[in-house]
Amino acid sequence: MISVFYCRCDDTFVPDGISGYRKRKIEEAALQSVRLQQIAAAKVLKAGFSVYGLEEKDIVYTKNANGKPYVENCPGVYFSLSHTSEIAVASFSGKETGIDCERSDRNISDRVFEKMFTENERRAYENERVRLWTAYESYCKYTGKGIERSNRDFEIPYFESEFEGNGIYFRRFSVYGCDVTLCAREKTEYVLKEIR
């Protein structure tokens, strides 16, 4: 089971019971829009860790060599976090997952599109570049290898809501005008819950 929590980035109230790391991320945000994203991130992380009987304030974060965050003091609890100007979203599971969200109207430049994706991917997603981007980035977060194209050995086929193949599962959904893609090793039930 994968638990997915999302929250709008529109609340200025900083929740109680969050880690010093999260508090610093909020306090160090130079722009109000980034501060709101960090507050929403704190809320989804707090909700997600509570599923495992954990309090976010007690979480010790660490990163792998490529920068993917892990929970150092709770082996077997995996999470992935993403945020835009509209929402923050996080996935939690007993296995690796990756999640990404982007505003549906985000512009993916021709230069980035040409550099990051294969000819088949560009042809399939020419008019839906954000959908391809969130699938790709969720895969990068799932593997923990970073966002270099050389880190994958398959093409992302066009899919509407879900795809399973090549030892990868993608699930796509839309929340508040944002495209969200979840990536896992295999098709798994998931629960989607909004945090207010």
Image (cartoon, rainbow, N blue to C red):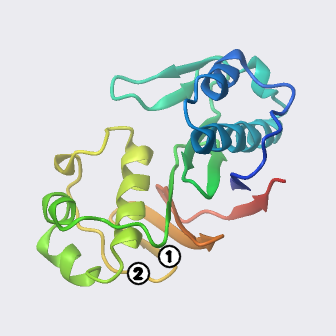
Q: Position of residue 77 (x, y in %)?
A: 65, 34
Instruction: Give residue 162's mark.
Output: 1
| Quadrant location of the N terminus in the rendered image | bottom right
Residue found 54% across the figure and 66% down from its top: 187
Is residue 1 visible from the viewing direction of this image?
Answer: no
Judge from the rendering whether residue 52 lies leftward or rightward of residue 189; answer left or right: right
Give the Cα separation between the discs numbered 2 and 1. 6 Å
Q: Position of residue 52 (x, y in %)?
A: 79, 36
Residue underneath mark 2? 159
Q: Dot 1 lies on which element?
A: strand
Residue found 76% across the figure and 18% down from its top: 58
**In front here: 14 or 154?**
14
**In front here: 112 or 33?**
33
Q: Position of residue 2 (x, y in %)?
A: 66, 54
Tell me if residue 187 comes above or below residue 143 in the rendering. below
Q: Amino acid at mark 1?
A: Glu
Q: Quadrant of residue 139?
A: bottom left
Q: Disc 2 vs disc 1: Cβ atoms closer than 8 Å?
A: yes
Instruction: Give residue 38's mark.
Output: none
Is residue 90 visible from the viewing direction of this image?
Answer: yes
Residue ranking furthest to the front: 31
Tell me if residue 25 comes above or below residue 123 in the rendering. above
Q: Quadrant of residue 193?
A: bottom right
Q: Dot 2 lies on which element?
A: loop
